[in-house]
Image: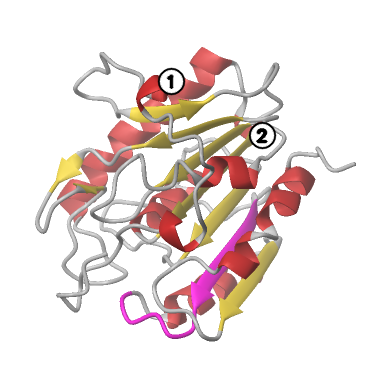
Amino acid sequence: MDRRSGVGHGGTASSSIGSSGNGAFADNVLRDVPADSLHFLKRPAAADPEGLLVLFHGRGADERDLFPLLDALDPAHRLLAVTPRGPLYLPPGGAHWYAVHEIGYPDPTTFTETFGVASEWLDALAADTGIASDRTVLGGFSQGAVMTYALGLGAGRPRPAGLIALSGFIPTVAGFELDLAQPLPRVVVGHGALDPVISVEWGRRAQESLAGVGADVTYHESPHMAHSIDPVFFRELPEWIDVTLGLAA
């Protein structure tokens, strides 16, 4: 995580939760990805997948950062789970989804280009796997949460079953429009009250905006957390995913 700039945000997240312990990244890399698409890691389901889980990393991380969290979120391996890499390489290093100049307002040029690439990639993933959007949960941390909101609520985008937005914000970008008409996906918003990178006010604002249009929103504010994932709250998410996809016993 880059804390050197007041407008910098993102970074690694999985270290606060722990690793799945398999460490088998190389075996899951899908190679020969077209230049206009996204590199990603894939964790297969144990049998025919009952849904799709996609996690988007934060600024300066990559597809490996949230990969260890897939087993924690889906311990029974009922889902196909994927972590893509942001397509941009910007200072201070690592992969990015867009350039940052002001929190809440992604750079229009880089955001628009990435949104188009990520949309096409996500649609191709759905087509290749045969897993429909209503069997899909999108999630992310920091910049990845911003992309989760954009891809899940953007005008013209297929509606996923659920969104998990951790330490992020709903983006405001020239030329980008949200579609907040019903039916809306279920949403989890998690934010640290002490976040110095993306203020908790952004999480509160997202909860208020989505609840105000009738979305089913679970909001958790962690009183002692900064810009990270609360491991206590994280342990509640597997059950939320099961309920969202109709997999709960």
Tag 1: amino acid: Ala
Query: For the image shown, how many numbered marks are present on the structure?
Result: 2
Q: Residue, x 69% and y 50% (percent of image)?
A: 238
Location of residue 6 with respect to 139 vertically, above or below: below
Q: Residue, x 25% and y 60% (percent of image)?
A: 106
Indicate left or right for 182 with 10 as reference: right
x, y (%) of residue 24?
A: 43, 29
Q: Quadrant of residue 46?
A: top right
Q: Are marks 2 and 1 in contact (CB under 8 Å)?
A: no
* Secondary structure at numbered mark 2: helix
Indicate left or right for 50 with 14 as reference: right
Residue annotated with mark 2? 134
Asked whether 4 falls inside the magenta stretch, the response is no
Q: Quadrant of residue 164?
A: bottom right
x, y (%) of residue 91?
A: 9, 56
x, y (%) of residue 99?
A: 17, 56
Q: Which residues are magenta?
A: 186-197
Tag 2: amino acid: Asp
* Secondary structure at numbered mark 1: helix
Q: Which residue is more in the foreground, 182 or 188?
A: 188
Q: Residues within 10 Å of mark 1 (few under 14, many from 20)?
A: few
Q: How is the image coloured?
A: secondary structure
Image quadrant occupied by the C terminus: top right
Residue annotated with mark 1? 124
Image quadrant occupied by the N terminus: bottom left
Distance from disc 2 to disc 1, alpha carbons, whole Å, reads 15 Å
x, y (%) of residue 200?
A: 45, 80
Asked whether 191 falls inside the magenta stretch, the response is yes
